[in-house]
Amino acid sequence: MFDYTYLPEPNMVPYLVETMAKIIFIFSMNMGVFAPLLGWVERKQSALMQDRIGANRADIFGFTLFGLVHVMTDALKLLTKEDFIPRGADRTLHYLAPFIAVAPALVAFAVIPFGGQYNLWGHKANMVIADLDVGILFVFAVASISTYGSVIAGWASNNNWSLLGGIRVGAQMLSYEVAMGLTLVGIFMVYGSLRLTDIGVAQENFFHWGIFLQPLGFFLFITCALAENKRTPFDIPEAESEIVAGYFTEYSGLKFAMFWMAEFLEMVTISAVLVALFFGGWQVPFVSHAMLADLFGFLGRDWAQVATMLVHVMVFWGKVLFWIFILMLIRWSLPRFRYDQVMNLGWKIILPLALVNIFITALVMLWVK
Amino acid sequence: MDLHTEPLVLNMGPSHPATHGTVRFLLKMDGEKVLHCETEIGYLHRGFEKQCEAGTWTQVFPYTDRLNYNSAIQNNVAYALAVEKLLGITGQIPERSTAIRTIMCELSRMADHYTNLGASMLELGALTAFLYFVEARELTWDIIESVCGARLTSNYVRVGGLSTDLPEGFAAHVKEVFPVNRVFWSEFDKLLTKNRIFLDRMRDTGGISEENAIAYGFTGPCLRACGVEYDVRKANPYLLYDQVDFDIPVGFTGDNFDRYLVRMEEINQSMRIIEQLIDKMPGGPVNIDNPAVRNPSKEAVKGRMESMIFHFKNTIEGIQVPAGEAYVPTEGSNGEVGFYLVSSGGGKPLKCRVRPPCFALTQAMGEMVQGAFLSDIIPTFDMINLIGGECDR
């Protein structure tokens, strides 16, 4: 096993450079690639599912770039729209809510490893921004802060539809965070750690991936994750046919875009957590770190590590993309639940099953010992 | 601690995504529960019945298209049948014309049910299912378009006949489209009928008892979903419905899921009717041979003096309908559609009253959603299929 703890080094500069590079990488991945592009992916994927062509009208000098120009026009439109605050709204909270919603989605990514550990020219590079020992708990803690954004938005808008949406968000998130935490207890027991890098390393063997060790936990977690993401079939807080647009009914322009972005970023974060916990993180199936480094051995020791790192990072994002695809597939296939049905599912089905899962895991672990 | 609470009064519509600007629900809510729901209609009122009195009998047809625009031809037919009854020429309509009218009515019913079911799926959040329904409807509309040139506002039927005969290759077109439509049908069935989320949303919501449904004046799929086997096509046959084999699907519980099932099965039955009629389509003319009712052919108008006079009289003064009143019930896709016409003799209707099926259904909204969740309003409202154009006239 590697030693993952950061020991104080005489020279902090490489660490500062590394951390800054990782922050910039993750930030630009999320804000520069995923936030705008997922809108396009969603349009094109839903078009594919629905026998349509999808966005293809906007063009620059006749080049439509497969509808990618729409992403730019969207940004332009949202930037130039009037920023409207309804009369009677709490202006401060109304302003604050989108920021509270979008920031946690970005911050949560800090603890998710997007690669392993590499020895580069004597410097140990760890492909995670903050390798916390509480790992996944940090993700939960931060994710629940984003709920405040939605609830405050619902309260501050001075609109009954927003209020109903805010209440629905509060109830739904509260129910599913409990269940979500419990579905992962099995994973913690199996891997014996909360630290996501530890869990990632433990999944080097393909058959030790979380989905094989915790199949029930996986299905429960993905259900909770969908509910946390507030997308169909769990999109009751923003059900457009019932409560107009839920908590962001009274938002326009860039603040609306921030809620929109928060939803997409949450989807990326959830996919990343799924990959990190259940799908081997950055690991290539059947190919261990050492094998990959040997394969690139002809490049020399350090460059082989760099090549391995690149492969791992790409594999990680590839898996994340795959899960985003699956999440969108579910979103475009199913109708939405009713408010009470969502609560029933959370408290009466998922929560007991999660407890059963913990129990079974404990028994199996005892038996294996 | 005793917390002081008040019911939340919520104004759902007319400007709301689910009410499409046509209706308003004044809701009194206890959290998510509906304590009371008051329905207010009339936002799409445009004086249809009064407009009809201004034109000739023939000029009413385009207006009838705009009642239930999803199945415009059924309105055309219902109006034409009433006028023909006033004229006393019901028995003289050529058989080919009647057969084509029956086929077009059933095609409209299919298109209407596709639209209604699709839109309901859309509002339940299943956009993909909606677009599959739209694709099936598109194929049906293609057939209607090939017949009368329009998809939505068809304006196809005339007093004493039809505006045109069927196009060439109509039977082949239908036989090519129906297998595709059946594949789509089984796809909807797979996607929805056993879908747990869909079942949970539709089962036991928006239900109404048999007695209350009859008391409110329900007709059509919503009445049949309650278990009442009443269909105008069987109970009071018109057109060629007594000469074809078809079944009336009937539900048990009267909830939204049964309404969905009844509509799904009616699509199948409509295809069955059309296929039977296409096989034994009678030949001959499509228009009555009576120049005082249906204009003579263009050649005759240009060649013969009498024909020219009839054409002029029919156009300027309108068909001369004897004084009296008439009502012919027909089975629209959403329930009984009928035109109650009064004539004082002459070229214009004295009174043209429509019986819209969704008016009776809308009355019961309050009862159907009483004590239900806010979310239950959506499938219930979709399943009664309120068409503003028809309800508000």
Image: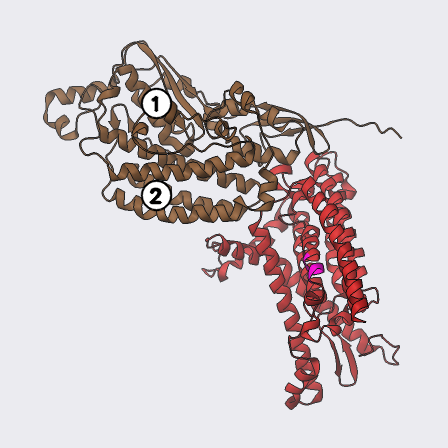
Chain colours: A red, B brown
Q: Residue furthest front?
A: A367
Element type where label 1 sits in the image: helix
Q: Is A186 covered by the magenta stretch?
A: no
Tell me where residue A99 appears, x and y as whole percent. 74, 51
| Residue where numbered disc 2 is placed | B142
- Residue B276 in the image, given as x and y percentages of width and height: 29, 38
Q: State which region is magenta.
A: A215-219
Residue at the image point whose x is 51% and y is 46% from the top: B129
Give the number of the disc on residue A210: none
Say which residue appears at 41% left-offset and 42% top-offset: B137
Say the numbered circle drawn on residue B79: 1
The span from disc 2 to disc 1 (Cα, nearest Å) is 24 Å
| Residue type, numbered disc 2 | Asp
Please tell me which residue is depicted at 58% across the width and 48% down the height of the picture: A334
Between B113 and A127, the one lying in front of the other is: B113
Total numbered labels placed on residues in the image? 2
Question: Residue B386 or B149: which is nearer the viewer?
Answer: B386
Q: Are marks 2 and 1 in contact (CB under 8 Å)?
A: no
Q: Earlier in the sequence, mark 2 or mark 1?
A: 1
**Is residue A195 shown to the viewer in this render?**
no
Residues indicated by labels 2 and 1 sit on the same polypeptide chain:
yes
**The disc numbered 2 marks a residue on which chain?**
B
The residue type indicated by label 1 comes to: Tyr
Residue A127, given in percent of the width and then of the height, sits at 74, 73
Q: Left or right of B381: which side holds A272?
A: right
What is the quadrant of the N terminus of chain A in the image? bottom right
Question: Looking at the rendering, in which quadrant would you find the C terminus of chain A?
Answer: bottom right
Left or right: B202 in relation to A309: left
Query: Measured along the vertical axis of the image, is residue A20 above or below residue A256?
Result: below
